[in-house]
Amino acid sequence: MTNALEDKVNDCVVIGGGPAGLTAAIYLARYHLSVTVFHDDSSRASSIPMSHNHAGFPDGISGTELLARMNAQAQLYGAAIRRRRITTLHKVDNLFMAEFENGTIRSRTVLLATGVVNRRPAMPQATHDEAVARGLLRYCPVCDGFEVTDKPIGVLGTGTKGFKEAVFLRSYTKDLTLISPEGIHDLSEIETSSLTHLGIRVEVGPVISTDLDKDMIRVATPTETYSFASMYPALGSDIRSHLASRLGARLSDEGCVIVDGHQRTTVPGFYAAGDVVAGLDQISHAMGQAGVAATTIRNDLGEQSALARC
């Protein structure tokens, strides 16, 4: 089926409707630029039950509430929000062509803010989602380590990722267990020695079941069952940078989009912000990058043609 080509040429198309994409849209719209945000409802922020380290919300705010407020704010100033997934992105005659189901939109610039996807432990989807909603399964110790202070905590992982996550969480609790998800651990002698010195228990897997009760998550291996107030998967994540790769933008070895100090990629007119860029995976950091990116887009467009109010 041929995609319908939209007549309007946007000043910017933002791909991704999380904190980075929506912050950029707010800035761009308030710069009196035409901006359309495309998203597929998959922002990691939407799964946050309650964020307590986002400045300005001392009682906390849920991810869904934060996104709803940001969506409303972006639209208030004229940004268009479309619930469509961009499937293909390419450049023709200095314009970007972004394709989605049954349509194509053109834009002078593009901001990629597609983020990353956490690798999940093996468990039923319903169990996973309930555990996250109840704070029994957590993915971000930087975000919510404070909430597990002095509680029994499990870390699911091994190797450098598992080691670093366990050591990081040790500053919040002394009751800490590192469990390998599949079998024996892949830890160096130095890592094993450090874990022992810090009093972190190291247990072998594989994990054969995960169950929830009133206020604990139970993790069973072939030899034992462990109960934790929360468990942190340290399994890594997958960066959503495939559109950047196909466009020819330079990526890091891990797959993050490489940008300069103003969030420009190696493709002129193409920018990136948020977790898809290497850095601290935090809402505040993503929003800061988005503000820089949006301002850079405005100034770069102004260099091409003066932005004068009629």
Image (cartoon, grey):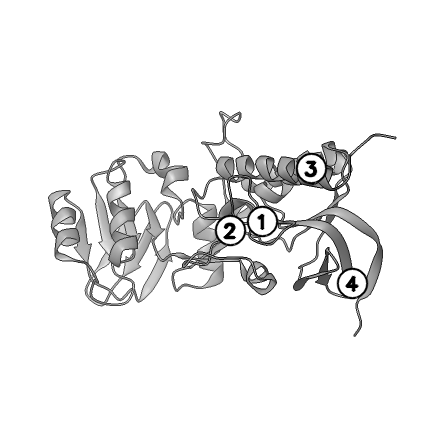
Residue at the image point whose x is 60% and y is 54% from the top: 267
Q: Which residue is mark 2?
A: 276
Q: Which mark is residue 298?
A: 3
Side of 293 where 258 appears, left or right: left
Q: Is residue 42 above or below residue 69?
A: below
Dot 4: what SS? strand
- Comparing 123 with 52, the one in front is 52
Q: Earlier in the sequence, mark 3 or mark 2?
A: 2
Side of 147 where 84 appears, left or right: right
Q: CA distance from mark 3 to mark 4?
A: 26 Å
Residue at the image point whose x is 51% and y is 44% from the top: 260
Image position, residue 41 (x, y; %):
62, 53
Residue 114 visible here? yes
- Comparing 276 with 175, the one in front is 276
Q: Which mark is residue 103?
A: 4
Where, quadrant-wise, is the N terminus in this rendering? bottom right
Q: What amino acid is labelled 2 in the image?
A: Val
User: Dot 4 surroundings within 10 Å: few (below 14), some, or many (20 or more)?
Assistant: some
Q: What amino acid is labelled 4 in the image?
A: Gly
Q: Which mark is residue 272?
A: none
- Comparing 275 with 218, the one in front is 275
Dot 1: what SS? loop
Q: Earlier in the sequence, mark 2 or mark 1?
A: 1
Q: Which residue is mark 1?
A: 113
Residue at the image point whose x is 35% and y is 38% from the top: 145
Q: CA distance from mark 4 to mark 1?
A: 20 Å
